[in-house]
Amino acid sequence: MIPAAWTPLRGLPVRTESGGLINRTYLLGDPPQFVVQRVSRIFGASVHADIEAVTAHLSVKGMLSPRLLHTDSGDLYSTDEEGEIWRAMNYVPGVSHSRVSSLALAEEAGRLVAQFHSALDDFSYDYQHVRLGVHDTPRHMERLATVATTESLLGARDVADRILAAWQSWQGEEESPARHAHGDLKISNLRFSEDGQGLCLLDLDTLGKMSLEVELGDALRSWCNPVGEDSLDTWFDGALFDAALRGYGSLRPLNAAQKDAIAGGVERICVELAARFCRDVWEDSYFGWNSERFPSRPAHNLYRAKGQLALGLSVRRFRRRD
């Protein structure tokens, strides 16, 4: 299954790591020594040059990061007979969380992201793998409106209409300049020590440049949702939001306007992700799904779309708290 491109991996026990929606991940060694991933085809091979450049810079700055393990021939990845791309990295011991369960964790997560951003302040690099339109929210809404012209078997048309209405009534400011960003700061992509200290960021396929309010908006969308994406009983936890920004601001101070823009970014990204989930009800092509809970991928993604829309509207109420 795993290509025989890395001598250090041979003979090590292998187990599948669950939880990822995009890449297939395996842990090698007992205890784990390496992480091997079969990379989703949505990512081009050039993403590995970006990962190598960023992690090398982080290393110079003294910040921990998983590093790509070069193949025996010196490459950053390997391609199997079916054209699938595989990569190997060193395993960083520690703890990953599926949810932000405390104010202390939220604050430390914010501090860790600020450390990452600070380490890249002087990084001069043109990314080779550019995800065009990844947070082009108007475009995501256009695509949803296009596919939702007919009713789906699951009755998703009403959900699509409500998502589009939420976007039309969203209020936000013009985006700040793009800067180096991780691009997918869900809490499971942050690594912590056993005693709760932030160690590093994981899953670096989404590296690139984006505004602070989109980067943190996407992060806080997930961090401040106490019940996770697979629930309709979702709500935005303002105390976690405040704690996360307190942690971020301890290294990179934020003014009131920036905090307001980040809150607007959270609402925007919630509605955007709801649109993406809802569109996949018709297209049935992108996100993974839980076959034990749902009869199909479209059914799971419709459920997710409803949850993200509810979360976005909860963020809107939080923004109006004053």
Image (spheres, rainbow, N blue to C red):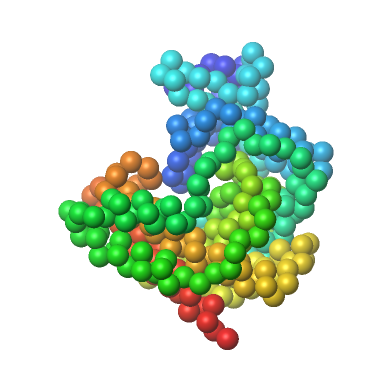
The image position of residue 79, as x and y in percent, is 50, 19
Residue at 45 percent across and 74 percent down: it is: 314
Work out whether residue 164 or residue 242 is closer to the camera in this orientation and state it: 164
Residue at 65 percent across and 60 percent down: it is: 176
Left or right position of 202 against 43: right
The answer to which image quadrant residue 288 occupies is top left
The image position of residue 227, as x and y in percent, is 44, 66
The image position of residue 159, as x and y in percent, is 29, 64
Which residue, as the protein is rendered here, is positioned at the far top? 73
Work out whether residue 317 or residue 236 is closer to the camera in this orientation and state it: 317
Left or right position of 304 against 154: right
The image position of residue 139, as x and y in percent, is 43, 52
Work out whether residue 90 or residue 146 is closer to the camera in this orientation and state it: 146
Residue at 53 percent across and 65 percent down: it is: 266
Where is 181 relative to 305, above or below?
above
Image quadrant where one finds the N terminus: top left
Image quadrant where one finds the C terminus: bottom right
* Marker count (numbered): 0
Residue 28 in view, yes or no: no
